[in-house]
Amino acid sequence: MVIVQNNPRISVSQMLSAYESQNTKRVYRGVLKGFLSFIYPDLTDENLDSLSLNYLDSPRDLRDDLLSYKESLAGQAPKTKTLKLSIVNQFLKLNGISLPEFLSKRVFAMKEKGAISDERIPTNNELRRICEYLPVHGKALALVLASSGMRVDEAIQIRDSDLDLSRNPVHVTVRSETTKTGRKRITFISPEAKEALEEWLTFRPKYLDQARARSAMYAREGRYDGILFPFTSGNFNNIWNNGLQRAGLYETDGRTNRVTMRPHNLRKFFRLRVGRFGRDESEALMGHQTGLNRVYADFGGVDGKARLASAYTKAIPELSIYGVKSFQLEKEILDKQSKFETIITNLSLENLALKRQFSAMDDKVQSQDAKLREVVDGISELKTTLSTLRRLVDKQ
């Protein structure tokens, strides 16, 4: 028997108002809308709250509704199903509706364990092939995801002000309100991602002008101002899948029909490569609580960031998709440039010293020359005097 308490009813919007994270609100709203749509096929965004309150006071069989809703989730990953059912259960509990233990066990029991769909992490060469078929904004986001370990929902909420393109490697601040854990962190992007990002930023104003001309969503004043990637995760999924198809890498799981090489796998691409240079560091950069706790608890704020940057820098060649170690090449060029600049500076100083020496020698030569002229003039005068004396002697 379902236990119902006479608490004041709370609508979906009222429930979501207690959360600060916009991502959490979006996910919870989507799940509750999906559950209620299963009950009310004519449900819309406008009547979501009213129908949610209506459902709470209706004489429906909650047991049948929950079990039927669970069956409708067949084929989805166990963790996804558990999350959706727990959100619905949380909504019910907030409204004083509790499931008896036997029903709760039946609703939340999952037969499947682990991933239900086959997944495949792209290789460096495969990711390069995919990027060749992505538009400029799709390529930029793909490389940012692969080299930063961010979730797609985190990356599409990054603001221009969250980037520090002057640092090497580029620093990215992932704000607390956009993370899954509600904890702020930093991560980095590779030189290749930076290059793709700078190309995208040059094109972005034109992209937004075109988008605003064809879509009311983009036309809203200030809608995407300062947002690095002004589009949705759904847009990117479509862009990514199109790139997979054109690259000849589009595959689906035979059981679930889900794409095997999904954007989320770029986080695994990141973890696999950066993890070789520090497991805790890779977990911290990805935003996993255990990694964040270990890195910052053991080393503190400034030292923790330095430790992350050190591990990441070592991993940059592994994150490269263009055959070679663009970061190492850039570093070698900068090192050689620095050496040449030092040599030029030293030669300039030596040249200046020589000029000064030559100038001093020139002054001495001119001084000696003047003295020599004085001596010559003196001899000439003596000769004249002697000549005069001889003439006088001869006359006598």
Image (tube, grey):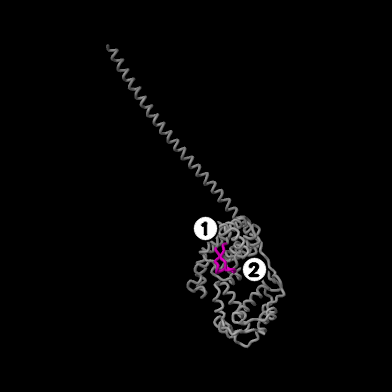
Dividing the picture into quadrants, the one containing residue 265 is bottom right
Please check the rendered image and state whether residue 235 is part of the magenta-colored stretch, yes or no: no
Nearer to us in this view, 128 or 390: 128
Please check the rendered image and state whether residue 178 is part of the magenta-colored stretch, yes or no: yes
| Residue type beneath disc 2 | Arg
> Mark on residue 166?
1
**Can you give x and y, in whole percent of width and height, for residue 7 in the image?**
58, 83
**Can you give x and y, in whole percent of width and height, for residue 98 in the image?**
64, 81
Label 1 Cα crowd, 10 Å radius (few <14 / some 14-19 / many 20+): few
| Residue type beneath disc 1 | Ser
Residue at image point 53% right, 46% down = 340
Judged from this view, the residue extending furthest toward the bottom is: 59
The earlier-in-sequence mark between 1 and 2 is: 1
The magenta segment? 173-186
For label 2, the SS is loop
For label 1, the SS is loop
Residue at image point 49% right, 40% down = 350
**Can you give x and y, in whole percent of width and height, for residue 294 in the image?**
62, 61
230 is higher (above) or lower (below) than 312: below
> Mark on residue 262?
2
Dividing the picture into quadrants, the one containing residue 94 is bottom right
Judged from this view, the residue extending furthest toward the left is: 396
> Mark on residue 377?
none
Residue at image point 62% right, 62% down = 291
